[in-house]
Image: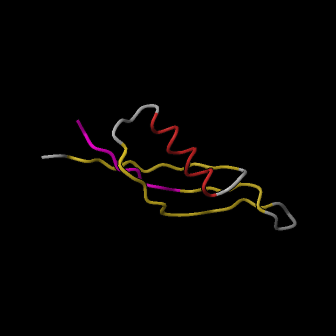
Amino acid sequence: MSVSKVIELSSSSTKSIEDAVQAGLRKMAQTVKNIQGAWVNDIKVVTSPDGAVTEWRVNMRINFLVE
């Protein structure tokens, strides 16, 4: 039998959505083992006054196996 756990986190990047997701996964992997996958729940952007995207933000859930 295996047991998994889900943790929700937020991450951001000035480059892209993909970079924000990768940054969150890399940070989580520093303290959590056996990461199995992630679900991006929400995508947000921060903009400059002229409407240009200055930062991408993601909220995601990360699934990992409990030893």
Front residue of 55/1: it is 1
Quadrant housing the C terminus: top left
Vertical placement of residue 31 versus 62, above or below: above
Vertical placement of residue 43 versus 27, above or below: below
Q: Is residue 59 left or right of residue 7?
A: right
Q: Residue at x 76, y 61 (%)?
A: 53
The picture places residue 3, in percent across and down from the top left corner, at 20, 46
Q: Residue at x 52, y 39 (%)?
A: 26
Residue farthest to the top, as pictured: 31
Residue farthest to the right, as pictured: 50
Find out whether residue 64 is within the magenta segment. yes
Vertical placement of residue 46 versus 33, above or below: below
The picture places residue 20, in percent across and down from the top left corner, at 60, 51
The picture places residue 32, in percent across and down from the top left corner, at 38, 35
Q: Which residues are magenta?
A: 59-67
Q: Is residue 55 left or right of residue 4?
A: right
